[in-house]
Image (tube, rainbow, N blue to C red):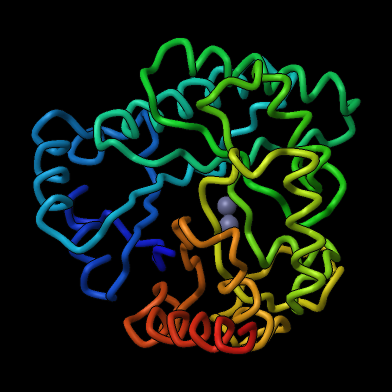
Amino acid sequence: MLIGAHVSTGGGLQTAVERGAAVGADAIQIFHPSPRARRPTNYGPADFAAFNEAFAASPVRSTVIHAVYLINTTSPDEVIREKSLSSLLHAVRLGDAIDADGVVLHAGSRKQEPLDEAVARSGEVVREVLAETESCPILFENTAGTQGPLGRDFDELQMLIEATGGGGRIGVCIDCCHLFASGFDIVEPDGLATVVDDLDRIVGLDRLRCLHVNDSAVPAGANRDKHANVGAGEMGPGGIATFLSEPRFEDLPAVLETPGPEKRGPDPAEVQRARELREQGLAARS
Ligand SMILES: [Zn+2]
Ligand SMILES: [Zn+2]
């Protein structure tokens, strides 16, 4: 398992690699810039080269890009659709340029729109982006379970996947805080094993490419997305240890998106804490 951290790209794309290495991360997640932002945030070949050079020389083994939250691939509004399309295209092109392991995407909220139509619109946007890019995967992330944002359970994730044509570039990213807030029973190994069985049956584990590891500031089933530092929320040390030691998650990047002690993201101690909890989880299972 590649324990990772969401890091800033402030000061240049390649600085994300340095920040990741500085907190002891094996994997990093970054936001891509808005497509309308001007340089220096709108990256070019020199930025990609600097990033790729820094990445090759660092202990970081995996990069994922988190798509910006303004994207709503499900919207019937033409303006929002176009903005979402260009923004997602921008993110996946960046992923191609830096050989990222995926662009993590919240499909968006359907608000009061019918589910089937919202899913179909999302599929069209994603298919257009796939057609105009090369190889970087797009990974739908599960949501915290409220009505509206698509991806609240594995059936909805599978609907989103099918609407894209279900090719090899489509996968999922599973966030444990969102599972927990959605009411999935994941804090004990048996409960988590059943949830992973369901994920395998409905979506397929070959589509699982990334994990988000956050504790939850709200109780199980509260249907709100509020991250806490690992071991310091309602999942607690035991719940995080269970999640990080699930055998079928062994080969995945597991990225912390926590507030961190200074509200500036995970620090070296928290990344280390996640490693220790994983060890504790593994020991408890054996
Ligand atoms: Zn997310
Ligand atoms: Zn997440």
Q: Is residue 79 left or right of residue 109?
A: left
Q: From what the image shows, is residue 248 above or below residue 185?
A: above
Q: Where, by quadrant of the figure, is residue 25 drawn?
A: bottom left
Q: Is residue 45 left or right of residue 262?
A: left
Residue 36 image position (x, y, % from top left): 36, 29
The residue at the point 56 percent across, 60 percent down is: 249
Q: Is residue 172 left or right of residue 194?
A: left
Residue 101 image position (x, y, % from top left): 39, 41
Q: Nearer the viewer, residue 208 or 89?
A: 208
The residue at the point 50 percent across, 26 percent down is: 169
Q: Quadrant of the N terminus?
A: bottom left
Write down which quadrant ligand 2 falls in: bottom right
The residue at the point 31 percent across, 32 percent down is: 94
Residue 92 image position (x, y, % from top left): 40, 29
Total of numbered circles in the picture?
0
Q: Nearer the viewer, residue 86 or 48?
A: 48
Q: Nearer the viewer, residue 67 or 243?
A: 243
Q: Where, by quadrant of the figure, is residue 273 drawn?
A: bottom left
